[in-house]
Image (tube, grey):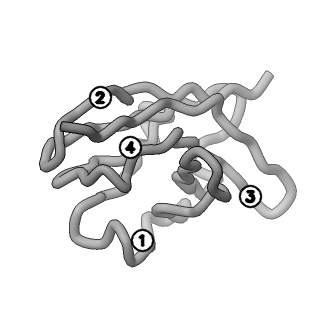
Amino acid sequence: QVQLVESGGGSVQPGGSLRLSCVASGIIFNRFAMIWYRQAPGQQRESVASITSFGATKYADSVKGRFTISRDNAKNTGYLQMNDLKPEDTAVYYCNCLDTLRNYWGQGTQVTVSS
């Protein structure tokens, strides 16, 4: 059974930092790309950052220079380090692991940025 479990969300003031984690089980993690998405209330889900199985990364323009995606294949875990958080970063954050045939989602973790 495949599971992706996110953690690390919470409430933080503007300018603060959080690190999200996504622990995968039931898959050979190092064969999957990973994408972090977010969805704010009333908005469509959007891709925030991605990392391939080889470690190549991409970022949405809105988070470049502030967010860093990484992975530790030995721990079956992906991360999203979020610095200099802004109110517009408030959303539910989801991790997504995929290869050419399969696509798995976590349950999401809430991030709230507010003063």
Observer-side mark, 3 or 4, equals: 4
Mark 3, residue position: 99
Mark 2 and mark 4 in contact (Cβ < 8 Å)? no
Observer-nearest of 115 and 82 = 115
Mark 2, residue position: 11
Q: Quadrant of residue 114?
A: top left
Q: Which mark is residue 18?
A: none
| Local crowd size for mark 1, using a 10 Å CA cut-off: few (<14), some (14–19), many (≥20) | some
Mark 4 and mark 3 in contact (Cβ < 8 Å)? no
Mark 1, residue position: 59
Residue 42 screen position, x and y as percent: 64, 50
| Most distant residue in the right direction | 101
Q: Which residue type carries mark 3?
A: Asp
- In terms of sequence position, does the residue under pointer 3 or pointer 4 come before the other? 4
> Residue at point 65% right, 48% down?
97
| Most distant residue in the bottom direction | 61
| Local crowd size for mark 3, using a 10 Å CA cut-off: few (<14), some (14–19), many (≥20) | some
> Residue at point 70% right, 36% down?
27
Observer-nearest of 81 and 74 = 81
When the figure is inspected, residue 89 is found, relative to residue 63, above or below; the finding is above
Mark 4, residue position: 79
Observer-side mark, 3 or 1, equals: 1
Residue 52 screen position, x and y as percent: 54, 64
